Amino acid sequence: MTISTFSFLVLGIACIINTVHGEPFTDGFISIDCGISSAAAYNDSITNIPYVSDDQFINTGVKANISASFFSSSLARQLSTLRSFPGGSRSCYLLNVTQGQKYLVRAIFMYGNYDGRNRASVGNPLRFDLYLDYNLWKIVKLTGAAEVHRPEAIFVASAHTVSVCLIKTGTGIPFISVLELRPLDRNMYPYTNESQSVALTYRYNVMPTTNSSIRFPPDAYDRIWEPVTWHSDWDMISTTCSVRSNWSDYFRPPSAVMQTAATPSTNSSKLHFQFDYVNMDALVNQFYFIFHFSELLPNTKREFNIYLNDQFWYANYSPPHLVAGNVHNTVPSSDGLHYYRWSLDSSGVSPLPPILNALEVYTPMYHTNVPTDSVDVDAITTIMGQYQLKKNWIGDPCAPKGYAWDGLNCSYTSNSTSIETVNLSSSALAGAISDSFGRFTRIKYLDLSYNNLTGKLPKVLGTLSSLEVLNLTGNNLNGSVPDSLLQKSQNGSLILILEGNPNLVCTKGTSCDPTTDIRKAKKIPTLTIVAVCVLLPVVLLLVALYIRLRIKAKGLANNCLRVEMEVDRQSQLLQFENRTFTSQELITITNNFQRVIGKGGSGVVYHGYMEDGTQVAVKKLSQKSSQGTNEFIAEVQHLLRIHHKNLVSMVGYCMEGDYQALIYEYMVQGTLQDHIRGKIHSAIAFDWGKRLQIAIEAAQGLEYLHYGCKPPLVHRDVKTANILLSERLEAKIADFGLSKAIQNYDEASDIMTMTVVGTIGYLDPNYHSTFQLSEKSDVYSFGVVLLELITAEPPILEGMPDAEVHIRERVEERLKTRKIEEIVDSKLENKCDISSIRKAVDLAFRCTSRILQERPSMGNVITDLRESLQLQSISFRGNENLQMGSDEVSQNSAQEMEQLASSCPSAR
Ligand SMILES: *[C@@H]1O[C@H](CO)[C@@H](O)[C@H](O)[C@H]1NC(C)=O
Ligand SMILES: *[C@@H]1O[C@H](CO)[C@@H](O)[C@H](O)[C@H]1NC(C)=O
C-alpha cells in the first residue's frame, strides 16, 4: 500500500479557477465510430474529438444503424451506428500503437435492436467475448437494447499493433459501436506493464454536481467518470477552485471530478459503501481500489481511517488541500471475499468527518492464452503480406484457444502455442511458394491445393520435421520435387499429394501427375488421346446400349451378365494394367519394400512408385504356399477385371518364388478407420454428411460385388480398415475377393486356414455355427461399419471393463436410457440431423440382425443411406453438391458409363 499526497499550502484566499485553455490536446487518440461510411469523419459536438469510420481498421463485418425507436437527439452520435459480425466466429480490429506506450482502450456497445430481432433481454442476454490481443478482456453481456456497455482496459503495448477481437462464443452475433484508444503517461497506473493489463470495473465521480459523466476535455486522458450518489444521507461539499494533480501523481483525476466530494451528513462520522463481487462483472475476484481525496475547504484538516470489511486498510489519512491525493493498493485484494464493505471513519484527531471525491476499481487481466510462437507468427504474417491475402487475419494467429485464424489450426500446450495446420486451399495464391512456408516450427498439415502457385518446390519444405501432409494439388508447379520430400514420402512420414501439376517432375524425369504421366511415358500423340477420349465413350456407350437392348430383348434381366460382359469388353478394349510383375520389379517399385502402409491378415502392404511415377500399393502375401496354382491365378485374373469407382482396382500381380504379391492403385487418404478414430486429421471426422456419403460409396462398391459380378463375390472382410479413401475422399472397398482366392488356394495346397475369414467384431456371428458366409454376412459387417461411423467407437473395446460387449449391444443398451443424440460421436458436435442419425441407427440394427431375413440387401442399404443423407442435407446445407439419385437404376448405369469414359486416360 502506498500513498501519494502532496501537501500544498494555499497561503492566501484566492485560488485558480478551473478553465480550459486553448484547443483540446488529442494527439495519439484513435477514435473509431464503427459502422459509419468512410467519408463521414466528424468532430464530436461535445468533446470535439475527431471520429473516423472503422473501414480502415477492419475488413469484415456488416454496417448497421440502430433501430429508429432507440435513436434520440440526446444519444451520443457514435452509438447510432455499429458493425456486426454475423459471419465469422472471430472478428478483429487492428490498431497501430507505439511499442512500450501505456494506453487506455475502450470499446462501446449499444445493441439498439439494429437487426429488429430484439436479441437482448434480461432473460436472454446478448453475449459474446471481447479480447485484447490474446487476453480475454470482458464477457460482453447486454440485457436490453438501450443498455450501453463500455469495457475499458489499461495496457502497455508490447508491439507496434494491438488487436481487439470479438469472439462469437454462443448464439449472440457480436457487434461493436465505438472503439477508442487513448495514450496515458508512463508513470500512471504503475501496476500495469507489458505483462500486466487491467480492466476497468468502476470509475465514479462521487457526489457530482450534474447527472452527466465527465470525460474529455476535463479529463485529458478521456477517462469516463460516472456520476454516483450512493446515499441520500450524504452531503456534498464542493469548490469552484481548481484541484491540481501533481505531475508525479499516478492517477491524475480531473479537477472537475475532484471539485466535489461526499461527506456524511451531520449526525454521522462515517462513510459506508459496499461492492458485491457477484455484481462487479469481473473475470476474477481480485481488485485494485483507488480512492481519490482532496480537501476542498480552506484552512481545514481532517484525518480518517479506511476499513475494509471492518479491518484496518489505511490509517490516519489526511487529504491535501486542493491537490489530488489518493490511497490505493498495489497488489490486488484477493482474499476470496464475496463483498467489499468499505468504511471511512474519522480517526478522532479532527472533529471533521471523512470525505470521498472519486473512486476507481480495476481488476487484473490474466493471460488466458499463451501467445503463438513468434517464429510462426512471423512466418504466417510474411505469407499474408506476400500473397496479399484478404482475410481477417488480425491479432494472435492461434489465440484465443479454439478461435485461430480462419484456415489455421493450432496446438496448445501449457507453455507453448504453435501453428499445426495451414490450409490455404483455393485461396487464389499466385506466384512462387514462399520460403516462409518452411519456417513453421511444428506444422503438420500444409494444404496449398487449388491455387495458381508456379515455379519450383522450395527445398526448405523438406526441413519441416513435423510435416505429415503436404497437399499441392491443382497448381502449376514445375521443376523436380526435392529429394528430401520424396524420401519422407517413401519412408511413410509424409503424405505428399502432387496431382494436377503436369510440369512437376517426381522421379527419373517423369511427371508427378499420373494422368499426364502416362501420356508422356507412352508417348501417345495428343491427337490419339483426344480421338480416343472423344470416340471411345461413344463406342462404349453404343456397345453397352446394344448389349443392354439384347439382354432386354431376350428377357434376360440378368444384371450380373450385363456387367460382366461390359467389363469384358472394357478390358479387351482398354487393356487395363493387368500385368504380371517380376520380383525384381517389385523391389524397384517399392524401393526394397521400404515403406509399410498397412498390415492385414493376408499380408503386408507397401507403398511404391511405378516406373512412370504412379503411386501403387503392393501387397505381399504372407500365406505359405507351393508354386503357382492355376486356381489362384484364375481368381486373381478375375479380380483384375473388376472395375468400379467404389472398388480399389488391382493393377497386377506377381507369382514368383517368395514374391507373391498383388499390386493395387494407391489410395492417398488411407483408411476410413484412421479418419474416424482421429489418426488422420480429416473433415470426415467432423461432418455427418461426409460420413454418410462415404457409407453410400462403400455400399455401392459392395453392391457391385454382390450383384454386378458373376458369380457374386462375397467380400468376407468388410471393415473400416478395408474402406480406403482417394485423394478427393471418395470411398473404395479394398481387399475384395482376395480372401476367397487365398482360401481356395490354401485348400488346394491342403492347408486349412481361417485367418483370412473376417475380422473379430465385424464377422457375422452366424458364421460360428454355419461356417458359411454369404452376401448377408457382408451386410452384417457393413452394419458394424455404420455403427462405427455414428459413434466413432471400435466394434470391440479393447482393454475396457466391458471389453467383450459388441458395438451393437453397447448402442442398444445406451439407447434404453439415453437420447439418440447422446450416443453420437461427440466430434460431430450436434451438427447432425437427429432423424438422419435415427434412420442410420435403425438401418445399422437391421443390418446386424441375427436373423438373416431381416438384413436388407446392399441395394436397400444404399436407398436408406441416401434418404438419411437427404435428411441431413436439408437440415445442414453445405452438402448440396452431393448427388441424390432419384432413380437408382438410371443412376447406376450412368455411373457405369462414366466409369468407362473416365478410364480413357489409362489407355495405352
Ligand atoms: C444508416 O442511416 C443513414 C442515414 O439515414 C443511411 O444513409 C445509411 O445508409 C444507413 N446505413 C445502413 C447500413 O442502413
Ligand atoms: C482445407 O480446406 C478445404 C476447404 O476449404 C478442405 O476441403 C480441405 O480438406 C482442407 N484441408 C485440410 C488439410 O484440412
Image (cartoon, helix red, strand yellow):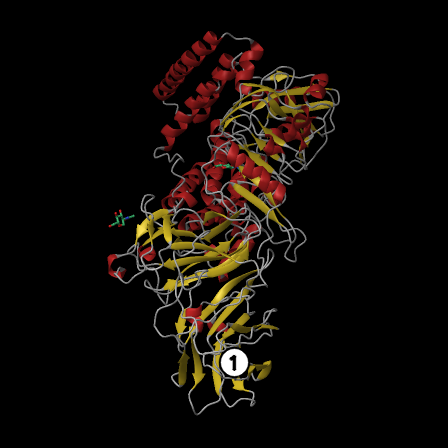
Q: Residue at x 55, y 42 (%)?
A: 781
Quick check: 534 above or below 406? above
Quick check: 27 above or below 145? above
Q: Position of residue 575 (x, y in %)?
A: 53, 14
Q: Position of residue 304 (x, y in %)?
A: 54, 84
For this rendering, which residue is in front, 163 or 17?
17
Give residue 5's quadrant in the image: bottom right
Q: Residue at x 40, y 25 (%)?
A: 893
Q: Secondary structure at mark 1?
A: strand
- Figure label count: 1
- The residue type indicated by label 1 comes to Trp
Tell whether 803 sits left or right of 141: right
Q: Is residue 584 visible?
A: yes
Q: Position of residue 848 (x, y in %)?
A: 52, 46
Residue situated furthest bottom in the rendering: 267
Q: Quadrant of the C terminus?
A: top right
Label 1 CA crowd tier, 10 Å (few <14, some 14–19, many 20+): some
Circle 1 is placed at which residue position?
342
Give residue 634's quadrant in the image: top right
Quick check: 152 above or below 533? below
Q: Position of residue 228 (x, y in %)?
A: 40, 74
